[in-house]
Amino acid sequence: MATIVSHAVVALAIGKALSTGKEARKYYLAGALCAIMPDADAVGYWLGVPYNSLFGHRGFTHSFFFAVLLATIMMTIFFAKNKFMSGAYLRIWCYFFLATAMHPVVDAMTSGGLGVAFFSPFSNHRYFFPFRPIRVCSIGFGDLFSHRGVVIFASEFLWLWVPAGVVAGIASLLTKKNVN
Ligand SMILES: [Zn+2]
């Protein structure tokens, strides 16, 4: 896993890119939750669920199918007033889907662990991208308070926070232009 804070940062940048500039705080909060939720499978890992099984770490909760489910659930919880399949509904749904789906995409660019089951539950094959510059953070927080933690954070900063900042910056410039 990359650290959950970095996953949330990626989601906030996507949220900014898809925003109209008038979103309530819950829009960003729910998007950050979407980005963090896939790592709820760490609970199973601690309870002894085998890493490479369907519900193992980076299994079902790291699939695109899970992203579809979670985006729909988050819409029901946070944006129930938006008419189903209306333009506003679809825009926010896409944001929640991308915020969730970017989590496994980022994990597939990390340097360790097993790959990501993008197509679970239909296939439990684990994928990695050929380009994996992000240093992996072990499950739990032990790594973060050591020298390794500094190395992990530096790689996440470079490969996640900087691109996220650029995307959010460009998006806010464009939104300002549209509002003016
Ligand atoms: Zn993960």
Image (cartoon, grey):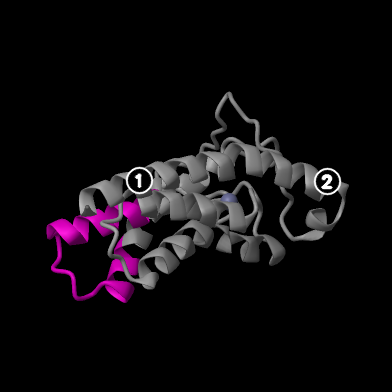
Rendering coords of residue 114 (x, y %): 65, 40
Residue 16 colored magenta? no
What's drawn in magenta, residue-wise?
72-98
Image mark count: 2
Looking at this view, name the residue that lies furthest to the front: 180
Q: At 41% across and 67% down in the image, what residue appears?
A: 30
Residue 133 seen: yes
The mark nearer the N terminus, 1 or 2, is: 2
Rendering coords of residue 60 (x, y %): 48, 52
Q: At 54% across and 34% down in the image, what residue appears?
A: 127
Rendering coords of residue 171 (x, y %): 36, 46
Secondary structure, mark 1, is: helix
Q: Residues within 10 Å of mark 2 (few under 14, many from 20)?
A: some
Kindly identify which residue carries mark 1: 173
Residue 84 colored magenta? yes
**Residue 83, picture quadrant:** bottom left
Residue 18's label in the rendered image is none
Q: At 35% across and 45% down in the image, what residue appears?
A: 173
User: Taking 175 as reference, is 21 above or below it?
Assistant: below
User: Taking 79 as reference, is 101 above or below it?
Assistant: above
Q: Nearer the viewer, residue 156 or 177?
A: 177
**Residue 74, picture quadrant:** bottom left
Kindly identify which residue carries mark 2: 148
Name the residue type under label 2.
Answer: Arg
Name the residue type under label 1.
Answer: Leu
Q: At 59% across and 35% down in the image, what residue appears?
A: 109
